[in-house]
Image (tube, rainbow, N blue to C red):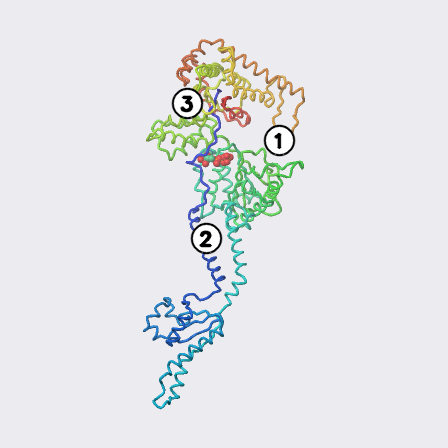
Amino acid sequence: MSENNNNKKTRQNNPLNKQGNNKPGNGKKKGSDWVMYIVYAVIIISLGGVWLGGGSRGGSKEIGWSRLDEILRKGDQKEIVVVDKERAEIFIKEEALQGDSSYNDITRGIKDMKDAGHYIYKFVDIETFKSDLDMVAQQNFERDTAGLADSNGYVNIGRINEIRRNSHIELKARESDKTWEKVMYWFGPLLMLIFFFFIMSRITNRQMGGGGGGIFSVGKSKAKIYDGKTSTNVTFKDVAGLAGAKEEVMEVVDFLKNPKKYTALGGKIPKGVLLVGPPGTGKTLLAKAVAGEANVPFFSMSGSDFVEMFVGVGASRVRDLFEEAKKKAPCIIFIDEIDAVGRARSRGGMSNANDERENTLNQLLTEMDGFGTNNGVIVMAATNRADILDKALLRAGRFDRQIYVELPDIDERKAIFEVHMKGLKLGNDIDKDFLSKQTPGFSGADIANVCNEAALVAARKNKPLIEKQDFLDAIDRIIGGLEKRSKVITTEEKRTIAYHESGHASVSWQLRWGQPLVKVTIVPRGKALGAAWYLPEERQITTYEQMFDEITSLVAGRAAEEVVFGQISTGALNDLERATKMAFSLVAYYGMSPKVGNISYYDSTGQSEWNFTKPFSEQTNETIDNEVKRMIEEAYQRAKDIILASRDKLDQLANLLFEREVIFREDVENIYGPRAWESKNENKEEGNHNEDKNEDKNEDKNEDKNEDPKE
Ligand code: ATP
């Protein structure tokens, strides 16, 4: 149970609006990868085939001795060629091929080939093969000469000689060209090994998200480049509000386009621009817009892209990034979330764990302002935590300019709503002024999220258009989480919660600086069992009275429980946590306690992480403790007094809340009457922009967790 402020921060991605980081044509690339793999496979198989198969000529049909014997006996062989003394290629006479159907078994295509034998016979031993041929020749001779003698027993010698010549089987010999085979035999395994490493390096590289070049390219920068060919498609029109920041960033673009204008007077172009601001305020969006508008090459990468498990890779990537950029100057390098590498270097030798990050940072420092010249390269970076960045990085000459990107004010919120409502189908009752009033403390990303969530809420209800109520539901959901009406709560607990929330509402209503109420609910939402919702004023400075009134409203829930039931519950955990933090900051940071005096122990550098000692004495420590305690005690007593003085009204409010579960500002006004000062004060938000920033004042509000301690 707790008070709930609308400026609760909710950081969620908006699927409608986040720009995807996918490289264009990724799908196509996948397809071509497969083709490449198939080509590799074919190469491997054919190399393997050549290697193992010894490069023999395929196609000719292999036959055994009986078939060869048959051919030889018919005398159909035109030529027999012995190849490499290991096989015989048999060529058949043309007329036999035409007229004898027994030669139909010759492999198709081979028939017409002049340099390949129609058949192959593999013999075991060349001498045996020769004697077998001689034997067949002799038998053919005897067969053909039988019966040639005339009645007198004479034979024609000329005819005999002719038959002998014809029956002789002549052999030719040939050596096959084995150069390729020999090369493959000796170098094949080596080639296959190289090929294997090539494939492996490609796979490793893909897993590490890099471009081509395998593990050898691990030290190359992973920056995405936007130049004439690719663009972010974001322009300054897509960035709503942020007028000051936009102006400064536009100037950066101008530096690059018209450097002479600035250097003519002897000025130097700034080297670095740092965008600093809370999450979701549009720093990355601004950088994307610069990329879209600058018409110069734009290298974009995230601080974490430098960090790899290998030592030295980060520094090498920084070097590579700047080398690439210098080649394409004038250009812009954008490093998002620079705190991943730019965190302050450690002072002592406590651990070496950060060595790699520190090397990367050192390289970045050198590149940004070393001996080398970076003419025409401007480095832009974004971070939420400028306080933890190394001082050397922030000094002039490196990041000369720091641009603060703040949470949007009411007009900027309206403009952001306008940008994100462009693609939505809206009903007639949408009032952007009203919505921007309802969302103080929301960042651009939160507003983008509200628009998206409202569309989803409307879709869930099957509405054709998105209406005002859908936006309000979306805001509630983003602040408080999803309603959990199914949560089991006993009547007794429900009554306690009703009084607790009414206590908050009642006291803050009656206090001069109590925040304007929106509604009170006892429907469980997220981790909260109930909540009072306010629209906090957006102040630039806060007075003691204002903060003390807030503390009083915070402890009023518990005060109501004590007054009504005579006992207190754990439901006030979140209220007490916030009240304590506020009181502590009043005493220790803002110097608002008379006993401690005008002293602040706040450390705006945020670099005292390793500092285990407190910057004050034990005695001051005790004084601070006592002062915090006193303030909260006083606020609690004050809340109890207010509740006791208007007890009957508290009962009415609590009963109404118990019955209806949600009550609105009007219901509270009906019971307590109007707030006298409200007519003067109303709608005064955004009134005075004071340069004297009161940085810490929102911290407590932002941290309100409405936890149910039982969960
Ligand atoms: P982080 O510090 O967390 O990286 P960031 O400041 O870089 O946050 P962005 O990523 O730029 O925030 O903003 C997130 C989304 O919020 C943007 O994609 C955009 O949809 C929306 N947004 C933020 N600010 C604006 C703005 N001024 N105008 C329009 N849209 C905005």
User: Which circle, 1 or 2, is nearer the viewer?
Assistant: 2
- The residue that label 1 is drawn on is 609
**Does ligand 1 reach within 8 Å of label 3's beta carbon?**
no
- The residue that label 2 is drawn on is 37
Give whichever of discs 1 and 2 has the lower sequence position: 2
User: What amino acid type should be assigned to the residue bearing mark 1?
Assistant: Glu
Give whichever of discs 3 and 1 has the lower sequence position: 3
User: What amino acid type should be assigned to the residue bearing mark 2?
Assistant: Tyr
Q: Secondary structure at mark 1?
A: loop
User: Looking at the image, which residue is at 45% across and 31% down?
Assistant: 446
Q: Nearer the viewer, residue 213 or 333?
A: 213
User: Which label was assigned to residue 486?
Assistant: 3
Q: Secondary structure at mark 2?
A: helix
User: Which circle, 3 or 1, is nearer the viewer?
Assistant: 3
Mark 2 and mark 3: span between their CA atoms? 55 Å
Mark 3 and mark 1: span between their CA atoms? 44 Å
619, above or below 270, in the image: above
144, above or below 216, in the image: below
Q: Secondary structure at mark 3?
A: loop
Residue 51 x %, y %: 50, 62
User: Looking at the image, which residue is at 47% across and 47% down?
Assistant: 227
627, above or below 645, in the image: below
Q: Nearer the viewer, residue 322 or 207?
A: 207
Marks 1 and 2 close (CB-CB < 8 Å): no
Residue 639 x %, y %: 52, 13
Most extreme residue toward the front is 152
User: What amino acid type should be assigned to the residue bearing mark 3?
Assistant: Ser
Left or right, 387 with respect to 17, comes to right
